[in-house]
Image: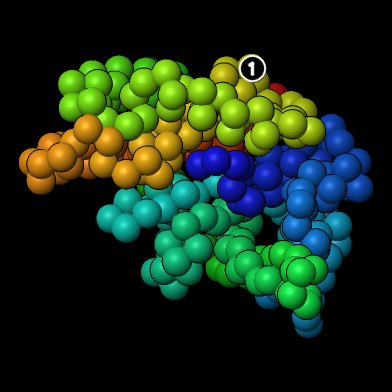
Amino acid sequence: MLSEPRSGRLAAWGNALLAGLVSPDDAVLAIVGEDAVHRVEGLPGESGPVGLTLALGRLRALGVKGLRVALPAPGHPLGLSGPPDFNARALDAEEAVVCHGAALGLVPEVYEAGPEGDVHVEVVWHCLAVREAPPADVPSLGEAERELAEALRDATEVLSRLDVAGSGPVAEAAVDAYRARAERGREVLAPGYPPRAVRVLELAQRVGLLISVAHENGHGGAVSASEISARALALRPVERTARRAQVAAYNAFVEERERGVR
């Protein structure tokens, strides 16, 4: 979780565009980010891949009113609603976007292209049919915020007791450096999102960074097999909670619309 998932950028800025809060050019620029180009293939009414601007306009014409994020992992179909083919593709990509208002979903496929020394990233979003049903295991913003605070407190206690890398000031400094690089020149979420969603996403990303630092710094002070296992057990639920919180934050725009808040 060192950076925003592509599905998060697509959903956040796509929602802002659908709500008329940003221009198509600004939305596409934010979605593409540092990638070279994004295309969408499999859109109903299109015979081949199309650019993001046309794709977002086509989705609006097809009745799409909002975009949700799914961040599934093995054994945890977070944000998905089926069918199995879409779920399998999303699980392989570890992310997807599910449309609200039309039974469609988008799964990214990432390619590297160009000569050595000048490689760039291209993304193709595959548009597929989805099942119109509530997304799996997505909490409310309030639930996500409470769960994240509790999971972080419990994990920090366990990791500190085991003297594990990722729980001390060195790890905190590394997280701050990561965040400074990740946030330079980018806006958290997109116009129209509630402040609580921004707060939850920032906390979820910070927790994700702590988990990454803990993994990247090896076993730290956990030298026995039992201590290594204890660390893994401590990190696993925190990572799961952080992913749930990210999805709750990205999906807050659509959830508020469903409740008639906006």
Q: Is residue 45 shown to the viewer in this render?
A: no
Q: Quadrant of the C terminus?
A: top right
Task: Using the image as rendered, state which of residue 84 and residue 239 is in the foreground.
Answer: 239
**Relative to residue 108, is residue 163 drawn left or right?**
left
Q: Quadrant of residue 107?
A: bottom right
In terms of secondary structure, where does tag 1 sit? Answer: helix
Q: Quadrant of residue 189?
A: top right
Identify residue for label 1: 195
Vertical arrangement, residue 158 with respect to residue 88, above or below:
above
> Could you tell me residue 61's position as x and y percent?
80, 57
In this rendered view, identify the residue nearer to me: 14 or 119: 119
**Residue drawn where x is 26% and y is 41% of the image:** 219
Above or below, comparing residue 77 to residue 175 in the picture: below
The amino acid pointed to by label 1 is Pro
In the figure, is residue 174 to the left or right of 72? right
Q: Residue at 37% of width from left, 40% of height from top?
A: 217
Residue 41 position in % (x across, y down):
71, 73
Q: Is residue 54 left or right of residue 127?
A: right
Judging from the image, the colouring scheme is rainbow
Foreground of the two, 161 or 187: 161
Q: Is residue 122 above or below residue 229?
A: below
Residue 89, above or below 224: below
How many labels, in total? 1
Query: Looking at this rendering, what residue extends furthest in the bottom direction?
Result: 47
Q: Residue at x 76, y 49 (%)?
A: 33
Instruction: Write the residue at 40% across / 44% down.
Output: 216
Mark 1 burial class by Cα count in 10 Å: few <14, some 14-19, many 20+? few
Q: Is any atom of residue 92 visible in this view? A: yes
> Residue 2, position in %: x, y?
55, 41
Point out residue 55 in the picture as x, y percentages from the top left corner. 79, 62
